Amino acid sequence: MRRRSKSFEIALSAMACAIAAGCLTLGSYVDFMLAAGYLLAIFALMIPLSKDFIWGHVLALAASVLLAFLFCGFAFLKLVPFVAFFGLHPLANYLEKRFVKKKILHLPCILAKAVWFDLAMWLSFRLVFVPIFGLNAATWYPFVERYFFLILFLGGTVVFVFYDYLIFLCQRSVNLVVARIRR
């Protein structure tokens, strides 16, 4: 097999960075599109991983967050969930798929990623959702505030397991699409 050139890695990473920065910027400007911006940025950052470019993914992630930070008028708090979890999660899945071969070891990996997700959601709730989106004015907020950790650690873990499985499937589909690029 022929070794891939550095220019190909740079081109894929630059494309992923441009798409991710655009999606993060759009999501930061339009509040109801924040989740969609995160999700499309995640898909874009899977592109370098489909060709085993780990450094390309890391540099594209850093550059896209930096560009989105500059384009959004220094609104870093809207990027906190992406920086804390969602941008790095495809890399964690890639490393798990590549290095964890025994099925029994996947359970501690899923549990570690679930704790990481729950902590990132706690940080996001405290720094982003309550102060920026004003969730403390919602009618259901007193109930959630009372049982916050129970809801977060039980509900968040169930949601994460489903999300993690879907991200594995999405990485597989990105791999199939990028495999058509001959290089």
Image (cartoon, helix red, strand yellow):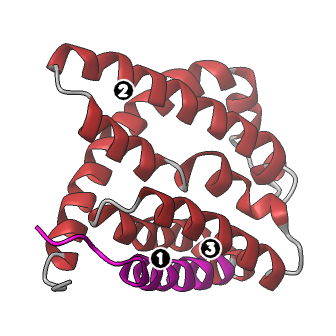
Check if residue 15 falls in the magenta segment.
yes
Q: Residue 95, can we see it?
A: yes
Task: Indicate the amino acid at tag 3.
Answer: Phe
Name the quadrant containing residue 169: bottom left
Bounds of the magenta segment? 1-25
Disc 1 from disc 3: Cα separation: 27 Å
Q: From mark 2 to mark 3, how far is it between C-alphas?
A: 29 Å
Front: mark 1 or 3: 1
The percent position of residue 73, horizontal first and vertical second, equals 88, 81
Residue 32 - label: 3
Label 2 amino acid?
Ile
- Residue 102's place in the image compared with 6, above or below, is above
Q: What whole-number distance in Å separates the C-alpha atoms at marks 1 and 2?
A: 27 Å
The one of 136 and 83 positioned closer to us in this rendering? 83
Give the residue number, with chain letter if any, for mark 1.
13
Which is nearer the N-term, disc 1 or disc 2?
1
Q: Residue at x 28, y 74 (%)?
A: 4
Residue 101 point in image, percent of width and height: 18, 26
Provide residue 45's location: percent of width, then percent of height: 45, 68
Q: Closer to the camera, 142 or 124?
A: 124
**In the image: residue 69, left or right of residue 110:** right
The quadrant of the image that shows the N terminus is: bottom left
Q: Position of residue 164 (x, y in %)?
A: 34, 42
